Image (cartoon, helix red, strand yellow):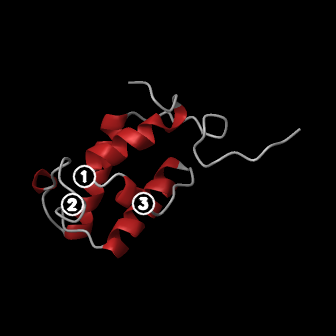
Amino acid sequence: MTTKTAPFSPESRPVLLVDRQRIEEWLIARIAGMRRIDPEQVDADESFIANGLSSRSSVALVGDLAKELGVPLPETLTWEYPTIAALAEHVAGVGASPHDD
């Protein structure tokens, strides 16, 4: 019997072999490239807005990350996880239990 599961429920989560640090580094490099600034100017603990992204560029960033990882990601992730650090932690945890704290 097949049942539908909510996005990213433990039963439907794809296993990602990417750690939080690598995702964070990728996001920083991508944002720096989008803004044409030095990666050191991007702050992982500041909001995407504070890092200079508009809602449109935030959606594009999530789309690029989904392609990079080869998994579907909701376009709303930058609103649900509004910093690079929070988004990286969430995406890295996609293959793990929901609350490993």
Q: Which of 14 and 47 is in front in this view?
A: 47
Q: What residue type is labelled 2?
A: Ala
One can see residue 35 in this view = yes
Q: Name the residue under label 1.
A: 28
Question: Amino acid under label 1?
Answer: Ile
Location of the C terminus by quadrant is top left
- The residue under label 3 is 62
Residue 73: x and y, percent?
52, 55
Q: In which quarter of the image is the N terminus?
A: top right
The residue at the point 57 percent across, 54 percent down is: 72
Q: Mark 2 points at which residue?
A: 32
Element type at marker 3? Answer: helix
- Residues under numbered marks 2 and 1 in contact, where contact means CB atoms less than 8 Å apart: yes
Q: Which amino acid does label 3 sit on?
A: Val
> How many residues crowd around disc 1 within 10 Å: few (fewer than 14), some, or many (20 or more)?
many
Residue at point 50% right, 33% down?
98
Q: Residue at x 35, y 48 (%)?
A: 87
Q: Position of residue 42 (x, y in %)?
A: 16, 55
